[in-house]
Image: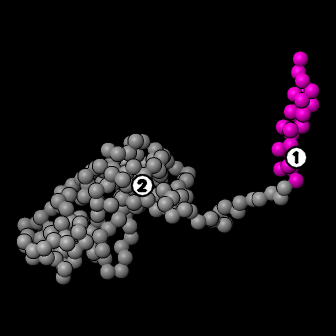
């Protein structure tokens, strides 16, 4: 047999939550018109970064694609080429660059493992979270969609390295004026 507590008090206690919230003022989020700022470390849309002179940071190593648990990233690396006149078509300071870079946001789970795997910090995540669209094709972001815009003072690749004399100078952040001589003290 059910006790008096179970038969009388439990239904009243269960409806207590309903009665408490029934008379509260309703709060409606005005989302498309009032957008709340995200947390600083929010994982949103990806971005391929550039060096201060405009060269791409991506060296086409494909580590981000290997680290992705959802298999959402596709990268094809290519070599920076040297023409017959001695000039080069350089897109990144290294030997290679990412010629094809795609992220499929239908698969991406925004976990951030790809940015942890990137050795040059070429790939970061922005605070942009509005990724919904009406077609599947528009949710596959190409390299042109992911590249950071050129800022004032940057030059559109391909061009020669402008910051330093070697690719190591790029990774150390040394500019042409602050490059140590061969055999000199390293910073």
Q: Name the image quarter holding residue 91.
A: bottom left
Give the main secondary structure, helix, strand or loop, of the magenta stretch.
helix
Mark toward the viewer: 2 or 1 = 1
Q: State the residue at coordinates (83%, 50%).
A: 21
Specify few, some or many for label 2: CA neighbours under 10 Å numbering under 14, 14-19, or 20 or more: some
Horizontally, is 1 left or right of 43 in the view?
right
Q: Nearer the viewer, residue 71 or 39?
A: 39
Horizontally, is 124 left or right of 181 in the view?
right
Q: Nearer the viewer, residue 76 or 173?
A: 173
> Which quadrant, please, contains the C terminus?
bottom left
Q: Nearer the viewer, residue 9 or 42?
A: 9
Label 2 with label 1: CB-CB less than 8 Å: no
Q: Kindly report the distance in space between the C-alpha atoms of the residues bearing marks 2 and 1.
A: 48 Å
Image spot of residue 8 (x, y percent): 92, 31
Q: Which residue is mark 1?
A: 19
Q: State the residue at coordinates (77%, 59%).
A: 27
Image spot of residue 126 (x, y percent): 46, 62
Q: Mark 2 vs mark 1: which is more N-terminal?
A: 1
- Residue 99 in view in this figure: no
User: Is-magenta flag for residue 16?
Assistant: yes
* Farthest residue, direction top: 1
**Residue 82 vertical position relative to residue 175 in the rendered view, above or below:** above
Secondary-structure class at tag 1: helix
Secondary-structure class at tag 2: strand
Q: Which residues are magenta?
A: 1-23
User: Is-magenta flag for residue 170?
Assistant: no
Q: Which residue is mark 2?
A: 141
Q: Name the image quarter holding residue 37.
A: bottom right
- Residue 97 in view in this figure: yes
Image spot of residue 163 (x, y percent): 22, 75
Image spot of residue 115 (x, y percent): 37, 55
């Amino acid at each position: 047999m059910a006790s008096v507590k179970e038969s009388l008090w439990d239904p009243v206690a269960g409806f207590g939550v309903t009665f408490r919230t029934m008379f509260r003022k309703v709060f409606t989020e005005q989302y498309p018109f009032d957008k709340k700022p995200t947390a600083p470390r929010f994982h949103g849309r990806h971005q391929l970064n550039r060096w201060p002179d405009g060269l791409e940071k991506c060296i086409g190593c494909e580590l981000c694609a290997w680290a992705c648990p959802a298999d959402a990233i596709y990268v094809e690396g290519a070599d920076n080429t040297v023409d017959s006149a001695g000039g080069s078509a350089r897109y990144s300071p290294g030997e290679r660059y990412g010629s094809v870079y795609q992220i499929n946001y239908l698969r991406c789970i925004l976990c951030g493992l790809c940015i942890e795997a990137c050795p040059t910090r070429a790939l970061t995540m922005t605070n942009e979270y509005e990724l919904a669209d009406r077609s599947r094709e528009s949710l596959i972001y190409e390299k042109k969609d992911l590249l950071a815009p050129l800022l004032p003072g940057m030059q559109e690749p391909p061009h020669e390295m402008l910051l330093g004399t070697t690719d190591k100078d790029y990774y150390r952040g040394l500019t042409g004026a602050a490059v140590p001589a061969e055999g000199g003290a390293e910073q």
